[in-house]
Every structure is written in C-alpha cells, then in structure tokens.
Amino acid sequence: MKKQFSFIICCIFLASCSKIDLMPISQKSVEGYYSSQKEINEALIGAYGNLRNIYVNSSFSYGLTESRSDNAWQITLAYPDGEISQFNETPLNALLTASWDTYYNQIMVTNRIIEGVQKIELEQSLKTRYESEARFLRALCYFDLVRLFGGVPMVTNPLSISEGYQVKRSSVKEVYDLIVDDLKFAAAGLSDANTGADLGRATKWAAHGMLGKVYLFRSGYPLKLGEWNLARQEFESVIGSGKFEFFQKYADNYAYTNEGGKQQVFSVQFVYSQNGNQFPGRNAPNTISKLPVASGGFPYVGSPYQLFVSKELVNSFEQGDLRKDIAIRTSWLNNGNAVITNDPFCQKYQNGPVQSGVNSWDIDWMVLSYTDVLMMYAEVLNEIGYDAGGKAFQLLNDVRKRAGLAAKTGADVPDQASFRLWMENERRWEFCFENLRWFDLVRTDRAFDVIKAFLANYSLGQNLKSKDQYFYPLPQTVLDITPDI
C-alpha cells in the first residue's frame, strides 16, 4: 500500500541541492552519496516525492497550464497567474523561475542516480530497474519543459558550476528525442507491476503510455512529425496489457477508494500526514462557510489562491452532462450565509482523509489515466484514417455515454476535421482542471484561435499576438546568470 511506500523527503536533498537553482545550471552534491543500493533507493523515493510539488502543490503546476487555458481566468494581476491568464507575462514572472528551478533540480537528482547506479556493486536487474525509474522521471521533466519553454538545455549528466555557465539551449526536436530515448529505456527495464512497498513506482505500462503521449505531441505542433502509428503501438500495448479498466461512473475516477486502481496508469501518491495533496482545498474559496458540503459549505480550509473557473467553461457543457456537476460546484454558502452562484470552483478530488485544519489530503493525483490513453488512442486512429462508426467513434462514445450523453454517429461527425473538434470538446469536459487543456490546444495548433476568442470576451484579444506565445520566455534570472542560453 502507499502508506508503506512513504516518500522520504530527507536531508540528502537539503544537502545535495544546496543552491542548485540552475542559475546557472549546476549540480553540486554531497561527495560520496549515491554510493550504495540503500542511498540510490532513497534518492529515487525522494525523486518520486518531488512529483508532489511538480504536478500538484506548486503554484506553477496549474498557473502555467490550466490558468493559461480558457478553462480558468485570473482577472487580477496581484497573483503571478494573472499575467499568465492575460498573456502579458514577462521573464520576471515568479512562476517561470519557480518551475525552471524545480524541474532542473529534479533532473539533477535523476542524473545523479543514473551516474551512481553505474558505480555501485549491484546485480544487473536492479541496476536496470533503478536507471529505468530515474530515466522515466527525467523524461517527465523534459516533457513538461519542452512544452512550456520550447527548446531547453539538455543536461544528462552532473555538471560542475563552471560547466553550468556554458550550457546552451537544444532544439525542440533534440529534447523530444531525449525524452523518447529515456521512455524507451524505461519501458524495457521497468517491472510489469509493483506490489507491497513498491506500489506507486512507475511500471512499464506507465512508460509505454507516456511514450505514446509523447509521439502524439511530436505529431502535432510544432514538430508535426506525423508519428501516429508509433503512438498507436504504444497505446495498444497499454490497452492490451489487461491491467487497466474504463470505469462506468465518471466520479469513480476521482474516488479515494479507487486510488492506485485500474484507472490509474501512473499517479503521484500522497499521504495527508506527509505533505498531502493540496489540490482539493486549494480550489475551495477561502470565504466558504465551514459546513458540510450537503449544507452548502466546505468542512475544511479553502484558499484565496483557488483556480478561478471561467464562465465560458461552465456554459460549454452540453445539457445533461454528468461531468459538469462532478467537476464543478456552481453554488455555495459563504461565511456570511449568503448563497454564491457567480463564483464556481473545481471540486475534483475532494474525497478521502484530510488532516484537520490543514489543506493536506490523502488522495493521489493521476498523471496519466486510462481514460486519457483511450481517448488519445481514438484520436490517433482518426488521424490514421477517419472511419464513421469505427473504433475511434466507439471509444469516444463510451466516454459520452458514461457522462449521460447520447452517442454520436457519422451524421453528427461527418469527417476527420469534425472528429478533431469533437475530441477537443470531450477532452476539455473530461479532463478540466487536470492541466491538459492548454497543452492540447497547442499541439493541435488551435490555441491561437481558441484563446484569442476567449480573451476577446475580456477585451484582451490583442494580448495574444502570435504563436510565439505558445511557449513561455525563459526566466530572467536564467538569462542574467547563464547568458549563453
């Protein structure tokens, strides 16, 4: 169980990461560490633990993704994601610096593990497993970095500080090639399944699923490599494994009782007593009444930093779509006993144990869900060849029927282009607030048109000037200290 696989946020990293903010990109570590199986394993557990901040608990996890999309809107510039929402950020934006530092510190850890594994006495199967895990985690970092910033420096081995000053940006294609190589290695070297204390570690299916997703992104903007068949093979590998299940109830995907189950291809594990999941409470308004949900309130702490849901998303759902009321709460009671209906908030993952008085929840976060795999597979099949009523239609209609909606036919979706727009909408409704929407719009090259129209609702359409804004500027701190980047 995940309680056995507790993440060790240990002093190793406080020591090894002393001033490794990648400004410049440098990797200074405690001399002699990573020199035994115990230390390698502890470092890996710590690296898994770092995913909590990368994917969920940091402000940049949603501020650079969901806040950039038309699912959310931050009207005030008092918070860093206000600039992000309004497309007027500069290299000085705090979220850019925080994300850059966090990702490259995680890359430092994985590089040290990869180097250390080669130096210790250990049976080959364990060496391969540990390196595969480290390369899987490194691939996750570079996959986010290349989608956020475009071409970034590729650091694949520990650097001295002087070497760090000299790093340069690699191309988008070069970064993606590294990601593919890491995930291929991981898919070959990771275990089929994990049990006991190893629950929560990446499996070969997580690597295959992420590799399929990477091929899907490589097939879209900006590379447009058309690697649809490569993506298809990876998704079919996951689907054919028999390890996963499409749940018949949408709400079951986010239920505490199902975490670690057959809907999750790869998840970040949380324990509420050890830096728990802050997503549920962070998305509840800080003025909500401390009452049971059934009474109109929220029994735990809310947050002034909530993700502000756009009215455009709320109004976009089809009538009768069950996903809307599961994902979004549109009415609540504030601490002055007033009923609020103009400030909806995300209520996904508000399930399971929580530490009293603290926004620390026990529920895990899905990085890659089985539904995502199935929907990406359907998308790939459509790109390979439109087939009215074929497998792609079946998969997407399964998603609709689970949401309480009628199936679509070839008469509703008459061609490949129509299927793409159908998929775009279903993915928006299915995965809202899971930090996927912005990346989906960029890879399909729809972001410029969709977001420009969205911004026009707030008289800010002129802020999105070109597709150059699909990627963020490098942080000013990086440009100042590492000018060769």
Image (cartoon, rainbow, N blue to C red):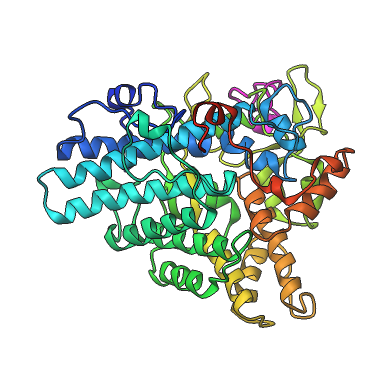
Task: Estimate the x, y position of residue 264 in percent, counting from the top left.
Answer: 45, 54
- Say which residue appears at 72% left-offset and 31% top-offset: 83
Instruction: Please identify the quarter of the rendering in which residue 112 is found.
Output: top left
Say which quadrant the N terminus sits in: top left
Residue 407 visible within the image: no
The answer to whether 472 appears left or right of 31 in the picture is right
Task: Estimate the x, y position of residue 463 in percent, counting from the top left.
Answer: 81, 40
Q: Is residue 472 a member of the stretch shown in magenta?
A: no
Asked if residue 223 is positioned above or below residue 300 in the image, the reply reads below
Q: Nearer the viewer, residue 133 or 466?
A: 466
- Say which residue appears at 73% left-offset and 58% top-offset: 446
Q: Nearer the viewer, residue 268 or 178?
A: 178
Task: Estimate the x, y position of residue 214 in percent, counting from the top left.
Answer: 50, 59
- Say which residue appears at 15% left-offset and 43% top-offset: 119
Task: Estimate the x, y position of residue 386 in percent, counting from the top left.
Answer: 67, 80
Asked if residue 319 is positioned above or below residue 304 in the image, the reply reads below
- Say which residue appears at 46% left-offset and 33% top-offset: 102
The answer to whether 105 appears left or right of 292 in the picture is left
Residue 485 visible within the image: yes
Residues rendered magenta in the picture: 285-302
Asked if residue 400 is positioned above or below residue 435 in the image, the reply reads below
* Count of numbered badges drawn on the protein: 0
Q: Nearer the viewer, residue 282 or 405?
A: 282
The answer to whether 314 appears left or right of 353 in the picture is right
The answer to whether 304 appears left or right of 116 in the picture is right
Q: Is residue 296 a member of the stretch shown in magenta?
A: yes
Dominant secondary structure, magenta: loop
Instruction: Please identify the quarter of the rendering in which residue 163 is found.
Output: top left
Asked if residue 452 is positioned above or below residue 399 in the image, the reply reads above
